[in-house]
Amino acid sequence: EAGVTQSPTHLIKTRGQQATLRCSPISGHTSVYWYQQALGLGLQFLLWYDEGEERNRGNFPPRFSGRQFPNYSSELNVNALELEDSALYLCASSLGGFNTEAFFGQGTRLTVV
Amino acid sequence: GENVEQHPSTLSVQEGDSAVIKCTYSDSASNYFPWYKQELGKRPQLIIDIRSNVGEKKDQRIAVTLNKTAKHFSLHITETQPEDSAVYFCAASYFGSSNTGKLIFGQGTTLQVKP
């Protein structure tokens, strides 16, 4: 069974540009979560999508947004990139509902220069 | 706000010794507490989890204990091996009728097991 896959693995952008990160959940999983892992700050919750809807978002500015497609894959968009957006962005998926076990992808390393 | 404090930030033990990592959470509604292991350059992987209706759970060399009254949970690794070296994250969440869907993570503990 394929795990959670993310693309691209690495992304280098210039300040002010937009970045798009993609995530494919495990087959059968309907919930997708996005986390930011900045150096020394642990994992910070960004967004939760379930059944195509945004269910919750963390304490991040509106320039962080995303969506979930009918096949449950997801996209994270970061507009007007700032240097401090440089981080590892991790996607996780779970079966949804009250199922709690979340499986992480390998992440996308975003570098803003 | 919701917060999880994790200690220590770094831990060095000799192979064969035990390691203990402790976490304290702030949201008394939390009812699910997973632990993730992240090796260098790899994804976080769930190693054990516990729900609020039990006080302890074991899986071979690892165990987790939960004290709901103190809002405190711990990871215990016995007979440590060099391959246990990694960053360990605790997390807390509420899953239920008003599911928030988010895990609040601790800051991580870098465990080094010396051969």
Image (spheres, rainbow, N blue to C red):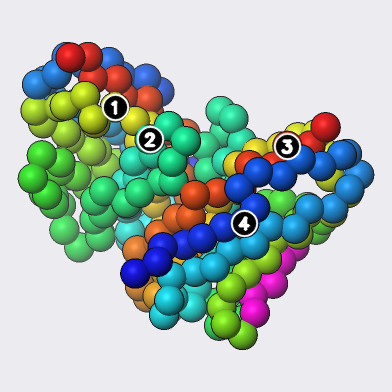
Q: Earlier in the sequence, mark 2 or mark 1?
A: 2
Whether the residues at callouts 2 and 1 have beta carbons within 8 Å, the answer is yes
Label 1: chain letter: B
Amino acid type at circle 4 is Ser
Q: Earlier in the sequence, mark 3 or mark 4?
A: 4
Viewer-side residue, A59 vs A5: A5
Residue at image point 61% right, 85% down: A70
Viewer-side residue, A58 vs B66: A58
Q: CA distance from mark 2 to mark 4?
A: 20 Å
Is B99 colored magenta in this rendering? no
Locate residue A24: give its quadrant.
bottom right
Residue at image point 35% right, 63% down: A101
Amino acid type at circle 3 is Thr
Q: CA distance from mark 3 to mark 1?
A: 27 Å
Q: Position of residue A91 (x, y in %)?
A: 54, 57
Give neighbour class at mark 1: few <14, some 14-19, many 20+ (Cα, 10 Å): many
Q: Which residue is mark 2?
A: B39
Q: Which residue is mark 4?
A: A7
Mark 1 residue element: loop
Q: Position of residue A99 (x, y in %)?
A: 35, 73
